[in-house]
Image: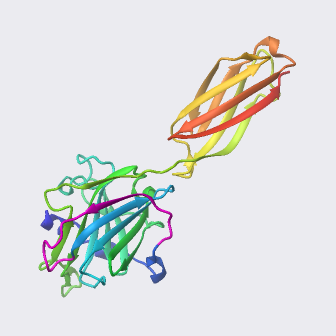
Amino acid sequence: MKGRLLMVVALGAALVALPAAALGSNAHAQSNSQTYPDSIGEDPLAPDITSIQVSNDDNANITFKVNISNRPAFTSDMEIDLFLDTDQNPATGDSQLLGADYIIQLLPGQVGVFQWNGTGFFSTPSSTTLTYAYDPTGATIHINASDLGGTKGFNFGVDAISGITVDAQGNPDYTNVHDDLAPDPGHGFFNYKVIVQISLTQTAFTTSPSPAKAGKRFSASLAANESDTSGPVASGTVTCSATVGGKRLPATHSLTSGIASCFWKLPKSAKGKTLHGKVTINSQGATLSKSFAVKVH
């Protein structure tokens, strides 16, 4: 597998150079932390990965801390590659890399994300969430799940390489490199689940018609965004409740483009009375409700 990895990750020319300020550590409140130990001392000439710690916060900002015991500096002959099977399906992505869909590649002063397109890995549009830092304990990588296809969980592995040289044409030469894979060759990938506490935010609420009319159809619509994507609620359940004159009304509902709509047929006897109702959206364990009261004409 080593030879295949080195061939695939020779992508340095496509990387984006970051300004020094971008290499600083991001201050994210991390939760859902998991540590993955790696065997040590496999190749004394290679960077020695001792463990990888992965965590994420409630905005799906993911942090990888690759602990390397014997490389206090990120020298010019080094490279670190993070392989991510973001749909957790080895049948998709690069079959020779255990189904990897993305590669994050680090070179001194440079970082990039590459996505599998069916035939090879190609640079993705510039990510505003991808940063890295290197200190005497190893590399730290920050990226949001939105830059990894919105993944909710992934399989992953890391390759730390040293001994890279440059040929006469300025191309990287991997002929005499040494590397350490985590997990060890033949042990597949590690697995991590992205866990976020979702919240829902109301963006709009409407009722129709106005005023409500006895004997006619009446609707109430609640639009909401979810915190993990900052976009409209993609899926969930809708609950509708309404009473008029103390009697509960049957309802139908829909959820389209983040808008939950409830529909009732108002009885003719509702004229002059007050319709009390509530629309509720439940998505990924989060709930948002909106109550209303309207006079029926």
* Magenta stretch, residue numbers: 26-47
33 horizontally vs 73: left or right: right
Task: Identify the residue at image location x=24%, y=70%.
Answer: 50
Q: Residue 276 vs residue 122: left or right?
A: right
Q: Is residue 35 magenta?
A: yes
Residue 102 in the image, given as x and y percentages of width and height: 32, 59
74 in relation to 149, above or below:
below
Residue 103 in the image: above or below residue 215? below
Determine the main secondary structure of the stretch shown in magenta: loop
Question: Residue at left 15%, top 64%?
Answer: 4
Quadrant, the N terminus: bottom left
Q: Residue furthest top?
A: 269
Q: How many marks?
A: 0
* Residue 175 falls left or right of residue 63: left
Q: Quadrant of the C terminus?
A: top right
User: How has the structure been colored for display?
Assistant: rainbow
Question: Residue 215 at x, y = what percent?
Answer: 77, 14
Which residue occupies the foreground of this view, 149 or 293? 293
Image point 21% across, 80% down: which residue? Answer: 172
Q: Quadrant of residue 52?
A: bottom left
> At 34% across and 74% down in the image, what residue appears?
139
The answer to which quarter of the image holds residue 131 is bottom left
Q: Is residue 65 magenta?
A: no
Coordinates of residue 224 in the picture (x, y in percent): 62, 43
Q: Is residue 59 above or below residue 71?
A: above
Which one is nearer the viewer's eye here, 230 or 216?
A: 230
Rendered position, 129 above or below 248: below
Q: Position of residue 284 (x, y in %)?
A: 50, 41
